[in-house]
Image: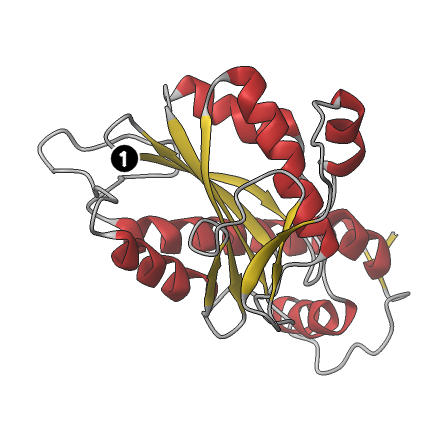
């Protein structure tokens, strides 16, 4: 027997939503405690359903970006012209807004771009809880290297809060910037999408620079450290949670 709270912790689920979901999966009228125990058959049934939901989220992303990609593994259809961001950035933002409106957990994706800013791949990096996701340098840069990206965009969402960057967001941007300079791949933009589909682009607000922040009161970027340093310890300390 296994308790529901153990399954929820494994998959980073919100407890209240998870109880409701399990009730639907097992056709039970009401489950009101995370200490509720399920047998092996019920456990496998729950996991199978959760994996199906996660695949549907990825399929939804693919459908929105068609005809740019055919699946999350970045198999571009050669006969279709890829989305070029020169003059089409608003189109990309609209697609991201549509996708994230239906995601109730933090989900990070990376977008590979070639030298002409064509979208050549979209990679699902991490799927977390409703207020946090965990990532690493390897999970971000492996697909970028494999697709031969010259530039890239990192996107994640704030399902419960506004698109305003948190301290963790700024620290993650700095860590990715440092890593990207080491690997020689241009970190083009860092985008946050809130629960209503509103977009915040670090590039458009001129804060794709180390240790910079955006002052929403004065509506301008500010620098919080005068002498940025290439600090590898900074990478490992901050490229964890956003």
Q: Locate residue 158, reporting x and y percent.
A: 60, 63
Residue in the picture at 71% in, 43% down: 171
Q: Does 58 sit above or below residue 17? A: above
Left or right: where 16 falls relative to 172: right
Left or right: where 121 falls relative to 156: left
Between 195 and 88, the residue placed more toward the observer is 88
Q: Residue furthest front?
A: 226
Q: Locate residue 52, reporting x and y percent.
A: 51, 52
Left or right: where 75 falls relative to 213: left
Q: Does 60 sit above or below residue 78? A: below
Between 23 and 194, the residue placed more toward the observer is 194
Q: Locate residue 125, reporting x and y percent.
A: 55, 39
Residue in the picture at 55% in, 47% down: 108
Q: How many marks?
A: 1
Which residue has dot 1 on it? 117
Q: Does 109 sit above or below residue 161? A: above
Q: Is residue 24 visible?
A: yes
Q: Locate residue 32, reporting x and y percent.
A: 83, 78
Task: State the image quarter where residue 146 is shown.
Answer: top left
Q: Is residue 133 visible?
A: no
Q: Does 79 sit above or below residue 216? A: above
């Amino acid at each position: 027997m296994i308790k529901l709270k153990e399954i929820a912790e494994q998959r980073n689920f919100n407890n209240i939503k998870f109880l409701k979901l399990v009730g639907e999966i097992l056709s039970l009228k009401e489950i009101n405690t995370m200490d509720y125990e399920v047998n092996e058959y019920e456990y496998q049934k729950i996991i199978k359903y959760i994996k199906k939901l996660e695949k549907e989220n990825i399929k939804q992303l693919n459908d929105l970006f068609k005809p740019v990609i055919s699946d999350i593994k970045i198999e571009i259809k050669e006969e279709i012209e890829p989305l070029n961001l020169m003059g089409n950035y608003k189109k990309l933002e609209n697609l991201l807004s549509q996708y994230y409106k239906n995601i109730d957990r933090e989900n990070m994706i990376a977008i590979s771009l070639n030298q002409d800013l064509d979208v050549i791949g979209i990679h699902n990096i991490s799927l977390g809880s409703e207020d946090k996701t965990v990532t690493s340098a390897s999970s971000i840069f492996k697909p970028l290297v494999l697709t031969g990206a010259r530039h890239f965009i990192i996107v994640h969402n704030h399902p419960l809060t506004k698109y305003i960057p948190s301290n963790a967001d700024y620290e993650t941007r700095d860590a990715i910037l440092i890593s990207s300079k080491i690997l020689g791949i241009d970190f083009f933009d860092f985008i946050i999408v809130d629960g209503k589909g509103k977009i915040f682009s670090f590039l458009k607000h001129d804060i794709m620079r180390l240790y910079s922040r955006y002052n929403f009161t004065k509506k301008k970027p500010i620098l919080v450290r005068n002498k940025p340093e290439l600090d590898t310890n900074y990478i490992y300390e901050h490229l964890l949670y956003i």
